[in-house]
């Protein structure tokens, strides 16, 4: 496959636009750390919402979804669809609270909610743990996707891909701060969605695929299209459906789906104009992330089963790619090799945009932790705004380099997804309750973090070193084990240590809840929570049914979505 002039023009034009945005906003973004990381706290909901969606539309996301579809069918996506419950919890219970807190990062929350040296230690340690170590793991998965795409599309080596993909992203991240990220995210999301939908339409018209109806009835595909798993297959049903819906969503910390909000989602909420804009931003994010975006990737994953029915066929098609990278998630970039000139350039640009959007957000978010919650808090408390920005920019470069190096030892997107889920297992309930249960203290969080990390590393080392101590354990069994041990550990730590002082709790409650009760409008919020969940799932499955040709069921589900929307509109004054 060879790119033509028009393809290169599209890609180069996008790079130039991204750099232009970074340069254009660099002056305002460089005034102080607040401008660089929160863009003055005056961003509208639609820009913040699109930015959240663009960030989760990483270069590895289409690969991940296509790989899941090939392995466990469309129903396998419940492993991440279940996180909608987490997202809706943030919409109706936590978005307003985060914006009201007035903190610069979600880690600054620790010294608002807790007090003493343990709170300071927790803030500083998590700044490095989340902002650097954990953040690098996430970015490494995105870099891994870039490596596979670079080899398939350009025949680049891993090193060449990483150099080219990183340079522009790092440059505009250094220049534009959060505002530059938000604006480029908006452009990138439009390009990414247009590219993925157009590519799907073209692939459906390939002679080998021959349209949607032929696709879903093909022998390689027919068993993969169900939206719900086969409940007679207990092992599969537990792993991809029951455990994610019953346990995973509330118990596991995962970037973009943090119980109680957090990470770059919290950063967007904190950058909003006001509480309503913060809430609407997260609501739009969950609607677009779960309902509007996945189907192009799902369809391409299904189509790949016709052209590349197994890993051997993928390996044969791409003999120059390191065999360790030949996994099911390679199917997505492999299918894009069939696209014509022009469209190919647009789709490659959309993947580059997805890469840049996610990496730039993680660089800015991680850097905000390094500067606000470590350097300015512990290293140099009297640091000038200029010094903070310099440290932030240096940390951006270092994190990008480390992520690129780590990506060279990963093999497929699903491996990293499973590792991240394990690392965050068991801590989710704590993040949900800490706003309302006064007994939780810094030692609760320290214990949860240490316990889940140790258990995750034991499982990870066992799989990599071939000790095979847990070879017979299914993935969901490992998650449940980690959740039980970690939750038990932090609950014991909570009752074995002193609670936060009353004065600190009173100040926290005054800032967050004011004169309202902690549980103000809780019944209405719970109703909104369920209406949001039902509405988004209805829209997601309605689109799927329409694509499958089941018009009656698609229309019924669309009607249910509309009812939920009307219900939320009727309750909006009490909810938003």
Image (tube, helix red, strand yellow):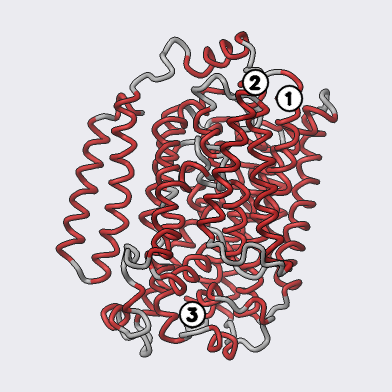
Indicate the quadrant where residue 88 lies. Answer: top left
Quadrant of the image containing the C terminus:
top left
Query: Residue 209: image x %, image y %?
Result: 36, 85
Q: Along the polypeptide, which appears first: circle 3 or circle 1?
A: 1
- Classify residue 119 by image quadrant: top right
Disc 3/disc 1 C-alpha distance (Å): 51 Å
Give the spatial CA distance, label 2 vs label 1. 8 Å
Q: Is residue 122 left or right of residue 386?
A: left
Residue closer to the observer: 483 or 315: 483
Disc 2, SS: loop
Q: Which residue is mark 2?
A: 114
Q: Nearer the viewer, mark 2 or mark 3?
A: 2
Is 551 left, or right, of 70 in this rendering?
left
Q: Residue 204 in the image: x percent, y percent?
A: 35, 79
- Find disc 1 in the rendering and name its residue: 118
Picture quadrant of residue 146: bottom right
Residue 409 lies, in percent from the top left, at: 73, 67
Q: How many discs mark residues in the rendered view?
A: 3
Between tags 3 and 1, which lies in front?
1
Relative vertical location of residue 276 with respect to residue 55 in this rendering, above or below = above
Q: Which residue is mark 3?
A: 335
Instruction: For label 3, count other residues whose C-alpha is less than 10 Å away and answer few (under 14), some (14-19) or many (20+).
Output: some
Work out which quarter of the rendered image holds the N terminus and state it. bottom right
Within-10-Å neighbours for mark 1: few <14, some 14–19, many 20+: some
Rendered residue at 25%/41% (across/down): 565
Q: Residue 219, image x and y in percent?
A: 33, 85
């Amino acid at each position: 496959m060879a790119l033509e002039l028009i393809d290169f023009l599209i890609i180069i034009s996008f790079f130039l636009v991204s750099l232009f945005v970074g340069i254009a906003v660099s002056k305002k973004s460089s005034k102080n750390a607040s401008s660089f990381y929160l863009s003055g706290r005056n961003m509208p909901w639609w820009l913040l919402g699109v930015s959240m969606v663009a960030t989760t539309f990483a270069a590895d996301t289409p690969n991940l979804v296509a790989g899941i579809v090939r392995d466990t069918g469309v129903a396998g996506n419940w492993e991440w669809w279940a996180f909608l419950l987490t997202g809706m919890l943030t919409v109706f219970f936590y978005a307003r609270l985060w914006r009201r807190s007035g903190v610069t990062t979600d880690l600054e929350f620790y010294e608002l909610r807790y007090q003493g040296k343990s709170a300071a230690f927790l803030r500083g340690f998590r700044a490095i743990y989340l902002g650097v170590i954990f953040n690098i793991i996430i970015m490494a998965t995105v870099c891994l996707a870039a490596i596979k795409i670079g080899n398939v599309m350009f025949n680049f080596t891993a090193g060449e891909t990483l150099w080219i993909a990183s340079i522009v992203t790092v440059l505009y991240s250094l220049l534009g701060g959060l505002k530059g990220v938000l604006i480029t995210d908006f452009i990138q999301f439009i390009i990414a969605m247009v590219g993925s939908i157009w590519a799907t339409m073209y692939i459906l018209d390939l002679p080998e695929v021959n349209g949607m109806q032929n696709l879903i009835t093909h022998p390689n595909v027919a068993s993969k299209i169900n939206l719900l798993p086969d409940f007679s297959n207990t092992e599969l049903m537990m792993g991809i459906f029951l455990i994610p819906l019953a346990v995973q969503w509330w118990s596991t910390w995962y970037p973009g789906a943090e119980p109680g909000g957090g990470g770059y989602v919290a950063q967007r909420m904190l950058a909003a104009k006001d509480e309503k804009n913060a809430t609407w931003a997260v609501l739009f994010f969950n609607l677009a992330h779960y309902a509007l975006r996945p189907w192009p990737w799902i369809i391409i994953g299904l189509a790949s089963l016709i052209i590349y029915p197994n890993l051997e066929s993928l390996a044969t098609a791409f003999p120059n790619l390191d065999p360790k990278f030949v996994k099911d998630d390679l199917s997505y970039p492999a299918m894009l090799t069939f696209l014509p000139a022009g469209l190919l350039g647009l789709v490659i640009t959309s993947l580059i945009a997805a890469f840049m959007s996610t990496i730039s957000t993680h660089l800015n978010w991680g850097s905000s932790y390094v500067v606000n919650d470590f350097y300015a808090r512990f290293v140099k408390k009297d640091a000038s705004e200029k010094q903070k920005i310099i440290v932030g920019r240096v940390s951006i470069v270092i994190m990008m380099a480390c992520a690129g190096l780590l990506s060279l030892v990963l093999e497929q997107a699903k491996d990293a997804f499973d590792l991240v889920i394990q690392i965050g297992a068991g801590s989710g309930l704590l993040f949900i309750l800490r706003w309302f249960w006064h007994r939780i203290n810094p030692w609760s969080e320290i214990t949860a973090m240490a316990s889940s990390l140790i258990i995750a590393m034991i499982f990870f080392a066992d799989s990599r070193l071939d000790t095979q101590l847990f070879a017979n354990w299914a993935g969901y069994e490992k998650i449940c084990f980690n959740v039980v041990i970690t939750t038990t550990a932090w609950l014991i730590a909570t009752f074995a240590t002193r609670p936060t002082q009353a004065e600190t709790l009173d100040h926290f409650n005054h800032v967050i809840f004011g004169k309202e009760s902690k549980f103000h409008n809780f019944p209405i919020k719970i109703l909104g929570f369920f209406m949001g969940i039902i509405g988004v799932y209805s829209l997601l499955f309605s689109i799927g049914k329409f694509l499958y040709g089941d018009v009656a069921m698609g229309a019924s589900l669309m009607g249910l979505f509309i009812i939920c929307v009307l219900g939320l509109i009727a309750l909006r004054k009490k909810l938003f």
